[in-house]
Image (cartoon, rainbow, N blue to C red):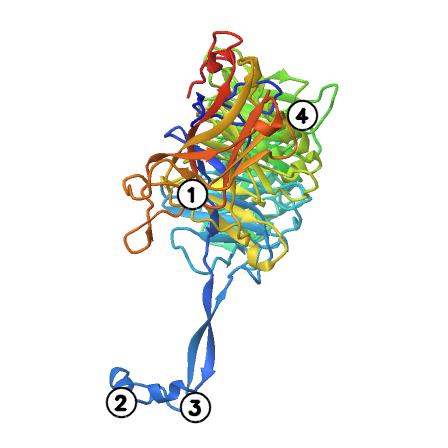
Amino acid sequence: MSIKTTSIQLSPLRGIDQRWDTDPRMALNITNMVWSDRDSWVTARGYNRLVQDAKAKTETVVTAADTSIQEMTSTSYVTSNPKPYTRGSKFNVLSGPTNSYTNESPPNSIGILTRHADHHQYITYETRDGQLRFFNGSKAPHDPHSQVIFYTGSNVTRNSTSLDVSPTIYGTFGSGMYLVNPNDQPLVFDGRKAMPMGYRTGPFTPEAETRSAKSDISDGSRGLGYKDKDLSEIIRYNYKVTFVNERGQESPASNAQSIRADLSSPTYFATTVAPGRLITLTLPVGPPATVARRIYRTQNRMNADGTVFAVELAQKYYFLDEIQDNVTQLYVDQKDDLLLGSELDEDSLGPVPTAISNFGVFKNTVFISVEDSPVLHYSRPLNPEVFPPGNMFDLSDSMSSKITALHVTKNSLVVFKSRGIYLIKGDPANGFFGHTLSVDIGCIAPQSVQEVPGIGVFFLSSDGVYCLEGALENTGTQTKVVKVSQVIRDLMNRVNFEYAEKFRSTVYHNDREYWLSVCLDEESVPGHVLKFSYEIGAWSLYDNFKTAGMIETPDDRGYLISAAPSLLTTEARGLYVYGSGNLKYGVDEYSSSYESVNIPFNSVYQNFSPARIQARIVGRGNKIKCEVITNREVNVIATSADATQQRPLEDFGFPIYGTAKFDAGLEYKEHRPIIARFDISTMHKGPVNEMRVKFSTDDEMELINYIVEARVGGSRDIMNLSEKFGGSLTR
């Protein structure tokens, strides 16, 4: 005789909510699952190496003892091989498999450079021994160890050899990738070689020497000074020089070289047809990345009577010439004052600051901060490696904390400090301006900042994950800072904030999720990922995912690539692609689970005795496990290891979880929704006030919803369960 029961459906299922009292359709924990647009929770994908293990070639000598020698000397073999191997021959055999990353230091950071409409992709990563390497995704080589070569021809070597130091930030401007951190010289990588970012100093002062010459000056002038030959032979000039790299970025100007020349008694530089005046310069040679030098000069500062013009003339320099090499040292100046070019604006030049800790591009202008400083520097527009001294914002306040992160939106540059948020708006033409958004909340994890579609800018603060939303895009709405991690308080309490600088994040658009890798409990390397499904506002957890950085490829495939840091074995290091299988750094067991919140059935029914759970799932030919916990007990009080089929095995049109067989022992694995029943009994435990349900599997699982069947007493009120606990949840 069957027990008369009442059925209560929990649908739709939503994300983690660890508050004491919440909607019954929420979960206490979701591990290794992802929400799908079928409104179900599906076992999350695993990850495989970006470059698969390859079989190594070894050279072997064929001897008479080789069993293969008979085959290799046979008539059939010789016929098919015009040059067959003979005894004593050497040939290559494949041995393996071999991990191509085994002899490489583990990755320490990762970035991506795309060129030519994303057709060329260079995944660039640092290793913990200071090497800078890249993987050319457009060619997809089997060997990922392409070493980034310095502009000098040598291998790039970095000082950032540990995850414990400030992380390397990767940014792009034009066709170059910029790599900055406080411990290394900032670099620019173009897919072929790396070069220094801009110039830290100007050139040495050029040397000048006066000469006169009998030279053929085509415009009929006498060269330097005045055209009138009856005027004084005394002239005075100042010179400055700048360096230019191959990206057109100009260094600060050198110190001035002043020269006073008396040409009344000339020392002839050359002998041609007409007298003229000239000065020779010895130019400084720039660093190897220099491709040109620019010469600037004042006008003649001498009056006809030999007195000096006003002092301000010595401060106005005009373009004289550009030497388009880094070799020539002798330059002859015989250009009349009237032929000089535009005036040099030295205030528009400036060196690249040292110890750069953050990098962002806003309105064709590069913004940077330096280590342990609240000062924000910005470049000249369209000149990402030139930083005029006056281009800065001092964001000091009563807290005086350093700038921790920069994030660029369409109409704002968001500047984070450990306590404080600031917005920079405007443009180069009309000027930039800033204002304070918050002095209470800030960002402590530099690489936790991501713009989540349709919601706002996510970042990690000292007490959880926040979202910056509102007027960043000039929508007219008020800018707000909203905490979004309050529903995962238990998880946040396990986060080891001591290692926040190691945390990494990305937005994985394929699954519509924000990923934040964190250290939980005693971890010192991020090994878990807090995932936020932004389409439904749901949190879940991805475990055993150690990473030193994550990037998403910008093409339509949208691969998520992770850099695996130093682990227990060398076999686990390297670059990994999420979504290509279930390999988990050598961990054989792959489990996923969905655990409901504690549902207070006693608030609706006078008594409640559960009898069975019916899970609406997608049949995949594998097994799932159901566990029931009542009254917030520590131990499981009821377990059903296998789903019990609702219909006979003979009905092959009804796929089930388990080992249903058909036709010669093949497992039936048609994917479509089915009902899996789990018979439970809690009669021996007495009254059930609250109950939670946990579904898990070591294989795959897709959970749509579930039904609790129970024997119940009278209703305490007339409201149904969903209405009782907050109404409907929208997708």
Between 236 and 329, the residue placed more toward the observer is 329
Give the labeled residue for mark 3. 88
Q: Earlier in the sequence, mark 4 or mark 2?
A: 2
Q: Give the class, few, some or many, for how many residues have Cα within 10 Å of label 1's Cα (few <14, many ≥20).
A: some
Residue 722's tag is none
Secondary structure beneath dot 4 equals: loop
Between 651 and 221, the residue placed more toward the observer is 651
- Horizontally, is 222 left or right of 674 in the view? right
Could you tell me if the residues under marks 4 and 2 are in contact, i.e. CB atoms within 8 Å? no
Q: Earlier in the sequence, mark 1 or mark 4?
A: 4
The quadrant of the picture occupied by the C terminus is top left
Where is residue 282? Give x, y as percent. 60, 50
The quadrant of the picture occupied by the N terminus is top left
Residue 251, relative to residue 378: is it above or below? below
Could you tell me if the residues under marks 2 and 1 are in contact, i.e. CB atoms within 8 Å? no
Where is residue 26? Give x, y as percent. 52, 24
Give the labeled residue for mark 4. 463
Give the labeled residue for mark 2. 75
Q: Residue at left 43%, top 32%?
A: 615
Q: Earlier in the sequence, mark 3 or mark 2?
A: 2
Between 229 and 363, the residue placed more toward the observer is 363
Q: Measure how far apart labels 3 and 4 are at the Cα level.
A: 71 Å
Secondary structure beneath dot 3 equals: loop
Q: Earlier in the sequence, mark 2 or mark 1?
A: 2
Amino acid bearing label 4 = Asp
Q: Measure how far apart labels 2 and 1 are at the Cα level.
A: 51 Å
Amino acid bearing label 2 = Thr
